[in-house]
Image: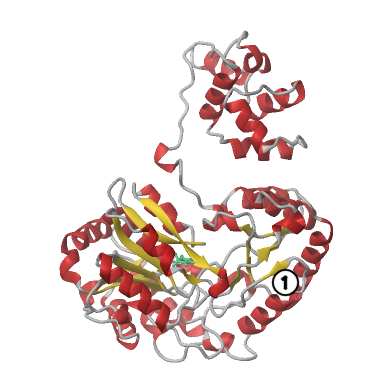
Amino acid sequence: MAKDTFADRLKQAMEQRGKKQIDLIHAAAGQGVKIGKSHISQYVNGKNIPRADILHCLATILNVDEEWLKSGQTAEVSFQEQEHMESTGGRPMREFRKSSKLNNVLYDVRGPVVDEAARMEEAGTQILKLNIGNPAPFGFRTPDEVIYDMRRQLTECEGYSPANGLFSARKAIMQYAQLKQIPNVSMEDIYTGNGVSELINICMSALLDDGDEILIPSPDYPLWTACATLAGGTAVHYICDEQSDWYPDMEDIRKKITDRTKAIVIINPNNPTGALYPREVLEQIVEIAREHQLIIFSDEIYDRLVMDGEEHISIASLAPDLFCVTYSGLSKSHMIAGFRIGWMILSGNKSVAKDYVEGIKMLSNMRLCSNVPAQSIVQTALGGHQSVKSYVVQGGRIREQRDFIYKALTDIPGISAVKPKAAFYIFPKIDVKKFNIVDDEKFALDLLRDKKILLIHGGGFNWHQPDHFRVVYLPRIEVLKESVEKMADFFSYYRQ
Ligand SMILES: Cc1ncc(COP(=O)(O)O)c(C=O)c1O
């Protein structure tokens, strides 16, 4: 059946190919054709039809017959589909589309800009990567003792472990919880996971019914929003305020609470801003959670990467009367992101969450257990000498790199930033008026194509203005220097 209007046919082809408006814009740019956001939305909404060259480009991208797209006159199927039909004896070829549950899910830390970088690398271009918080490729090596102990235990790790984790791992995590003064934690309250990532997914799936709301920071680590959305919940973003060292804006949090709000997520230390929340800020969040009977989810994966002599405080230690879940792991502090080991600690008032915990257990049982060799070294990693400390003290590699990147970036006219206190990210602000930037993903793509530098635009962290980007400052100073020099040059001419 031919569709009636150009817009109908365009939408049908986009749906069949699983392409959104933004995908068409990028694909067209890849072919050297510039299509504006407003133009594409006019085509889709039937308010305008494209010129011949753009029509040709759209038909190519969508792999449909150009004449059909234009007038609906010729066969509705493309040449390739006709070939398929011949090979299936005349029946249309069945296509498999991703679930519509993924429609609003965003994870740009590995998204279209990263795909473009991969394409460029494939074509032989060297890319300076400032995009992903993965310490090992930047020469941050796993402590020797961890490797040695894992080797020794490998043959004992062939079978599944209990679903919530090996006794030795949970014991070490429980002792860690004691040191962080997290109250009311027993061995049953600790779960190991294939990274914190898996546990975030489990917690969101077990908690959220369709339409339930959860407060998540903006900017966030986007997995939180993605998992809440995938679970059917509504991620409601509260603002972290750059003017106040990126601390959560309490007024904004209060404004956004409704009778469907079940929980609040904090990321402390923060990715992408590098903020570390002081006690007073945490106390105010606890107060709000107490008033509205919210669960507190606290992602503390960077809790050992704190600089300037500051101390990390677990929010759960301030909320013994509330149900809290605290997450951490070894991906960052022990530079073993690839081994996939994280954990969560349920604490405080567990009596209000009995049924929810049943759900968590169910999902935890369904994945059988987390990676056992990685669990086997939790005790080694958490005990004794903490090599991570040497990176964050004065003269340590992460601290030096932090100081360098902060100064170098803020020396660029039009770029400002809050100095990070923890983790290894900085989230600088762009003077959008100066550079006329309206689309931050386009900015990231332009920087990538012009200067071969890969970073993630603020939108990738659910930051809704086009005025920020995140830099991972794990590379050595020489590499950071080269990158920032190129960025300074880029900003000297770039206007969107
Ligand atoms: C805030 C935050 N939480 C969780 C994760 C995921 O950690 P894992 O490697 O333990 O899955 C990351 C990774 O970058 C992160 O930045």
Query: Toward the viewer: 2 or 147?
Result: 2
Query: Toward the viewer: 47 or 204?
Result: 47
Residue at the disc numbered 1: 409
Q: Would residue 191 be visible to someone looking at this image?
A: no
Query: Toward the viewer: 435 or 404?
Result: 435
Amino acid type indicated by mark 1: Leu
Looking at the image, residue 360 lies above or below residue 124: below
Q: Along the horizontal axis of the image, is 389 left or right of 40?
A: left
**Which residue is rendered at x = 31% and y = 81% of the image?**
318
Q: Along the horizontal axis of the image, is 489 left or right of 401?
A: right
CB at mark 1 closer than 8 A to ligand 1? no
**Which residue is rendered at x = 58% and y = 85% of the image?**
391
Looking at the image, residue 492 lies above or below residue 342: above
Looking at the image, residue 472 lies above or below residue 10: below
Q: Along the horizontal axis of the image, is 343 left or right of 269?
A: left
Query: Toward the viewer: 250 or 137?
Result: 250
Q: Along the horizontal axis of the image, is 393 left or right of 350?
A: right
**Which residue is rendered at x = 74% and y = 51% of the image?**
446
Query: Residue 79, how many percent across, how many down?
Result: 63, 17
Looking at the image, residue 201 lies above or below residue 388: above
**Which residue is rendered at x = 61% and y = 39% of the image?**
22
Query: Residue 321, how many percent across, how many down?
Result: 22, 76
Q: Secondary structure at mark 1?
A: helix
| Crowd around label 1: few <14 · some 14–19 · many ≥20 (10 Å) | many
